[in-house]
Structures are given as C-alpha cells and as structure tokens.
Image: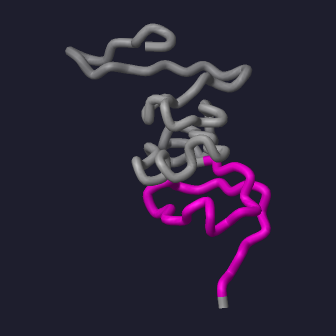
C-alpha cells in the first residue's frame, strides 16, 4: 500500500528529507528550516515551491525565508528577515565581522 499524503504544504528539516515532489503531488510548497538545505532537496524542489527558512539554532522559530526558490538561486541564500526582525550575518575573521546587507 502506498501512502499519498494530502497536504498543501510541508515544513521539514532538509537533511533527512528524501521525498521527491512527484511522490507527493498534493504538496504545493515545501518549507525547509532547522539546518542548511541539502543539494538533493535544492535540486528536487527548486522551481516547485521551495521556501528555504532559517532561524538560529537556539530558538524554534524561523527569522528569514527565501521564498519560491528556483534552481539558479544560490543554495545558501537564506532570504530577507521577517518584518519586526533584525538579522545579521557574521564572518568569522579575527573575531566576528558583521557583513553588509545582501553580502
């Protein structure tokens, strides 16, 4: 027996995710969060409704989302921060340096 979930979207951690979009046609978009998106997930779901979320590991929320990811998007693009949220990307070079927006 094949299980065919009927969900309009799914929120998943990318590393254990091995589901291909063809196997869940009712999923209109996939939100990943909790860790960096994998190459497999990026290749399988980009251009098909991939939303790449990011949130610090110390919390259980998402603070940025790169919506509607396409295959030519950079795999490490975490998207803009949500309204009423601040986000900083730090570069570990002689301490941590704050990178400019869109770096």
Nearer to us in this view, 17 or 89: 17
**Place of residue 17 in the rendered image (x, y in percent of width and height, measured from the top left):** 50, 62
Residue shown at 51%/37% (left/top)?
Answer: 71
**Of 68 and 60, which appears nearest the observer?**
68
Residue at image coords 72%, 58%: 27
Q: Compared to 92, does 50 lie above or below?
A: below
Residue 99, compared with residue 40, is above or below; it is above
> Is 35 situated left or right of 81 in this image?
left
Is residue 16 located in the magenta-colored stretch of the structure?
Answer: yes
Residue 18 shown in magenta: yes
Image label count = 0
Outermost residue toward the bottom? 1
Quarter-wise, where is residue 8 in the image?
A: bottom right
Q: Residue at x 57, y 49 (%)?
A: 45
Question: On the picture, is 88 further left or further right than 69?
Answer: left
Q: Quadrant of residue 98?
A: top left
Q: Quadrant of residue 95?
A: top left
- Vertical order, 8 against 31 (above or below): below
Q: How is the image coloured?
A: one colour
Q: Which residues are magenta?
A: 2-31
Residue found farthest to the left = 94
Residue 81 x/y as whole percent: 62, 24
| Residue 89 left/right relative to 48 | left
Picture quarter with the C terminus: top left
Q: In the image, what residue occupies the spot 66% across and 22% down?
A: 85
Residue 88's x, y, as percent?
49, 19
For residue 79, side relative to residue 2 (left or right) = left
Location of the N terminus by quadrant is bottom right
Q: Main secondary structure of the magenta part?
A: loop
């Amino acid at each position: 027996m094949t299980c065919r979930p009927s969900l309009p979207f799914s929120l998943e951690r990318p590393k254990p995710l091995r589901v291909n979009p063809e196997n869940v046609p009712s999923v209109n978009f996939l939100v990943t969060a909790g860790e960096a998106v994998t190459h497999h997930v990026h290749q399988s779901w980009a251009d098909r409704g991939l939303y790449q979320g990011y949130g610090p590991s110390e919390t259980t929320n998402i603070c940025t989302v790169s919506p509607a990811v396409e295959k030519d998007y950079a795999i490490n693009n975490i998207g803009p921060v949500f309204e009423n949220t601040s986000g900083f990307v730090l570069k570990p070079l002689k301490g941590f340096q704050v990178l400019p927006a869109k770096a």
